[in-house]
Image (spheres, rainbow, N blue to C red):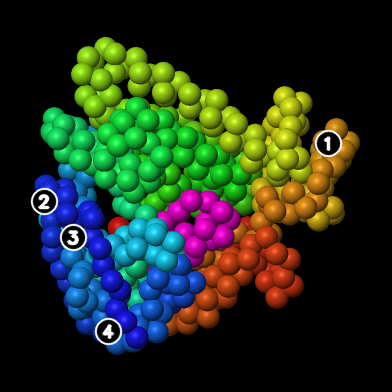
Amino acid sequence: MSAPIFDNSYARLPDRFYTKLAPKPVAAPALIALNTGLAKDMGLDAAWLQSDAGVAMLAGNKMPDGAEPLAQVYAGHQFGGWSPQLGDGRANVLGEVVGPGGERWDIQLKGSGPTPYSRNGDGRAGLGPVMREYIISEAMHAFDVPTTRALAAVSSGERVQRETGVPGAILTRAARSHIRVGTFQYFAARQDDEAVQILLNHAIARHYPEVAGGDALGFLNAVIDAQADLVARWMGLGFIHGVMNTDNTHVGGLTIDYGPCAFMDAYHPATVFSSIDHAGRYAYQGQPEVLVWNLAQLATSLLPLIDADRDTAVKAAQAALARFGDVYTASWKRVFFAKIGFAVGTDAHVVLVQDLLTRMADNQADFTRVFRAMARGQGAREEFVDPTSFDEWEAKWGGGGAQIMRAANPAIIPRNHRVEEAIAAGMQGDYAPFHRLNQALAQPFEDDPQFADLEAAPSAQQMVRQTFCGT
């Protein structure tokens, strides 16, 4: 058995990018789950990770040689309001490992104790948010959506105080980096152009090696492309991030920070789940528009590096941002054309999709179940309050490729009520529902009779209408 071999490129950046500090040990760590498939992809020894020394690392109790734990600093717009300093308030990046294929991974602990960026918080995580992020981030990976990953979940043997005392836990998150739009904003707001340039070079090397070193405009265009494709994929799954702040917008085009996120049951474009999103800023239908706003903040941060002449830089950034609509629309078409069974389509297919979505909203039809039933060739009309509404649409549609639809429309998603059931059981020390849900979601496009119950929409009593931030 062998410990990870670290090569910590972020820790080699200037010390104003982070604060180096060790995680705060916990009382009695116990392994809840280890993602052995991801461990293999990262070149990690799963047997070592399950050993006493491995669990000690995953809990933050003892660091192996080569780890350089640090908390990253960043800023951000939260619900449109500027916060000049945020940062990892309950997380430590332990270091980086390089996988067998040359991929570089951050290993980060969430819930590892207070940092200088905790803003009077305790730096800990409750068991519920850790289980939620593990389930949903791994499901997103199985859906082929770019995302941070869950390597492990560990119970801490301690209780953390939220509305009440709850069991504590730590998530080990793996990601190609943890660089956010807010990371660039932090240094740009301080007019630290040198730091922005260093960060730019680092982010290009980590995520877009095809972009020339130091090419700020090339980098901006690459981020726009990646994020437009990402959000189109979210839309195709009925996924609502819930807290699309600039500090939760990853420059590598990854889904990051699964707080009040949720998947829709019945389709409606104005759906909001987050308990703190009172104005519906991050509603399902608003996600592409919010993303443009977030990307504009990245562009603003990069202006001094795009061109020494500000007017020239602004025009170049505006031209880049103006591309977003076409890039997003192309991705949206690819996603939704596949959902109705077409590899390519026309404007008529766009109208067809929009007509179906309108009918679904009017008929309280379940987003996931309708599209999967279409792939199966039966059962879609029963999802509509007025089944003849689907019949009318189906006559216009005429059918699509079943194989295309099966690959585009999952049978199982992490439905809110199932996630909450798994969390409730976990709170009582029963992790069987958690493991079963993860097992089902590992192959979400398969029809597996043993998991058929997980396809069901919630009853009125089971329905979850609000989700909450993990802090």
Please give the range of residues in magenta.
Answer: 135-151
Residue at image point 39% right, 58% down? 103
- Residue 211, label in figure: none
On screen, residue 380 above or below 361? below
Indicate which disc residue 70 carries. 3
- Between marks 2 and 3 in the image, the one whose residue lies nearer the viewer: 2
| Label 2 Cα crowd, 10 Å radius (few <14 / some 14-19 / many 20+) | few
Category of crowding for the residue at label 3, using alpha-carbon neighbours closer than 10 angstroms: few (below 14), some (14–19), many (at least 20) = many
**Which mark lies nearer to you, 1 or 4?**
4
Residue positioned 60% across, 48% down in the render: 237
The amino acid pointed to by label 1 is: Trp
Q: Earlier in the sequence, mark 3 or mark 1?
A: 3
Relative side of 96 to 50, left or right: left
Distance in Å between CA atoms under marks 1 and 4: 58 Å
Task: Give the number of the mark in front: 2 or 1.
Answer: 2
Q: Does label 4 or label 3 sit earlier along the sequence?
A: 4
Q: CA distance from mark 4 to mark 3?
A: 20 Å
Who is closer to the viewer here, 57 or 48?
A: 48
* Residue 320 or residue 98, whichever sits in front: 98
Q: Relative to residue 44, is residue 257 depicted above or below?
A: above
Q: Give the secondary structure at mark 3.
A: strand
| Picture disc at residue 15 | 2
Relative to 66, is 398 on the left or the right? right
Q: Residue furthest top?
A: 311
The residue located at (17%, 54%) in the rendering is 12
Residue type at numbered disc 3: Leu
Q: Earlier in the sequence, mark 2 or mark 1?
A: 2
For marks 2 and 4, give the CA distance.
29 Å
**Sequence-first disc among 2 and 4:** 2
Which x, y percent locates residue 207? 38, 46
Q: Which residue is mark 4?
A: 53
Label 2, secondary structure: give it. Answer: helix
